[in-house]
Amino acid sequence: MYDMETRRSTLALLAQGRSLNSVSRQTGVSRAAIRAWQRRVEPVPRMARDCRPQGPADTAAYAYLLGLYLGDGCVSPHPHGGHYLRIACADAWPGLIHLCRTAVVAVRPGVSVAVVQKQGCVMVSSYDRHWPCLFPQHGPGRKHDRAIVLADWQREIVDAHPWELVRGLVHSDGCRTTNWTTRAVGGVTRRYEYPRYFFTNKSADILRLFTDTLDGLGVAWTRANAKNISVARRASVALMDAHIGPKH
């Protein structure tokens, strides 16, 4: 296994504009390994490499849970082996807490799920040795500081259940709001209200996953700023309402 210094120095050569072939020849590292380091520089923990689960028992529930995880979740090791999946859910949305717990059990039937009260939120937590395999995007540090790329098998699930992924992302880091504007009609200023969806995330990769999925679903969106995506066109809001709706 290559150490972190070798991995980072190899990627630094690429950052200088060198070709993949020339860096591979100079370092002796295969092109496949270098490409893998571009996606994730940290070594995959041995448990995750050796883990061979049957896959999520319910793929639609998994697409939803993936959205929740990418927004407000983490996978962390237990000191004595195995891992915890933890997803933060605001106290204001008891329905979301229920949906999260239901999705966890649907994905891994038989696992226990605990709800731990924190300040302003609850942490939906589940212990299982296979969580690192089911969420290979896990790693040290914050998600927006590292590459977030779906594995091929995850992409197949998302392609089959795109609305479930979008629903999970919106339920974690999004909202449905009512905006208003004024317009002069016949010399009288009238107030108009209209619904709008927002999705907020600091990770460019997660934002791209969200917008790419919306594109495939025919939902029009705009970038409000560097970390906010807005859906405001009437037909697109109607689509979102049909499949997502406000949190509760």
Image: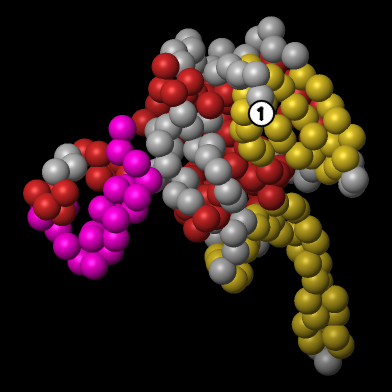
The residue carrying pointer 1 sits among few (fewer than 14), some (14 to 19) or many (20 or more) residues within 10 Å by Cα, namely many
Q: Is residue 116 magenta?
A: no
Residue 33 to residue 233: above or below: above
Residue 195 to residue 74: above or below: below
The N terminus - image quarter: top left
Magenta segment = 1-22
Q: Is residue 16 magenta?
A: yes
The C terminus - image quarter: top right
Residue 1 to residue 228: above or below: above
- Drawn side of residue 146 relative to residue 61, left or right: left
**Residue 228: quarter of image:** bottom right
Residue 134 seen in render: yes
Residue found at x 69% / y 50%: 173
What residue is disc 1 on?
85
Amino acid type at circle 1 is: Leu
Residue 202 to residue 187: above or below: above
Secondary structure mostly seen in the magenta stretch: helix
In this picture the colour scheme is: secondary structure
For the residue pair 171 and 142, the one nearer the viewer reads as 142
Whole-percent x and y of residue 148? 47, 46
Residue found at x 46% / y 16%: 51
Residue 58 seen in render: no
Whole-percent x and y of residue 194? 76, 63
Whole-percent x and y of residue 83? 62, 24
Whole-percent x and y of residue 82? 61, 19
Residue found at x 84% / y 36%: 122
Residue found at x 55% / y 43%: 140
For the residue pair 95 and 183, the one nearer the viewer reads as 95
